Image (tube, rainbow, N blue to C red):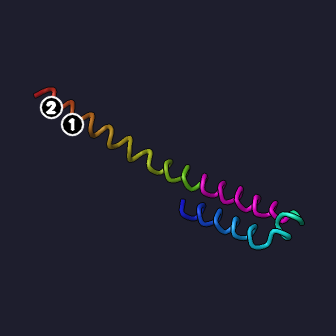
Amino acid sequence: MPGVFILNVVCAVCIRTWPELFVDRGAHVWLIVIQIISFGGYLLYVVRFYFNLAPLIAAAHCEWDNATGDRELS
């Protein structure tokens, strides 16, 4: 997430510093493309992270259910 913030700050600084290039000549479109690609990469990273995390959560949930079931039988 810090990378997304830094990218947005860099884009804002570039547009503020060189408005004739990014606004008048249409180079802001390249900044938009970079942001969309970065968002897609971050989205893939998050999906992959949670995909790898899901089995661990399921195993912990089963372990908690078994621990609760043992206490109820006692």
Q: Residue 32 versus residue 53: which sits nearer the camera?
A: 32
Label 2: element kind: helix
Q: Residue 6 versus residue 37: which sits nearer the camera?
A: 6
Q: Main secondary structure of the magenta part?
A: helix
Q: Residue 3 versus residue 9: which sits nearer the camera?
A: 9
Q: Quadrant of residue 2?
A: bottom right
Label 1: element kind: helix
Q: Quadrant of residue 15?
A: bottom right
The three-letter amino acid code for the residue at tag 1 is: Ala
* Disc sitting over residue 26 in the figure: none
Residue 8, position as x, y percentages in the image: 65, 62
The answer to whether 49 appears left or right of 70 in the picture is: right
Residue 58, position as x, y percentages in the image: 38, 40
Q: Is residue 36 above or below residue 17?
A: above
The three-letter amino acid code for the residue at tag 2 is: Arg
User: Is residue 31 magenta-colored?
Assistant: yes
Quick check: marks 2 and 1 in contact, CB under 8 Å? Answer: yes
Q: CA distance from mark 2 to mark 1?
A: 7 Å
Query: Which residue sits furthest right?
Result: 25
First to last magenta residue range: 27-43
Q: Quadrant of residue 60?
A: top left
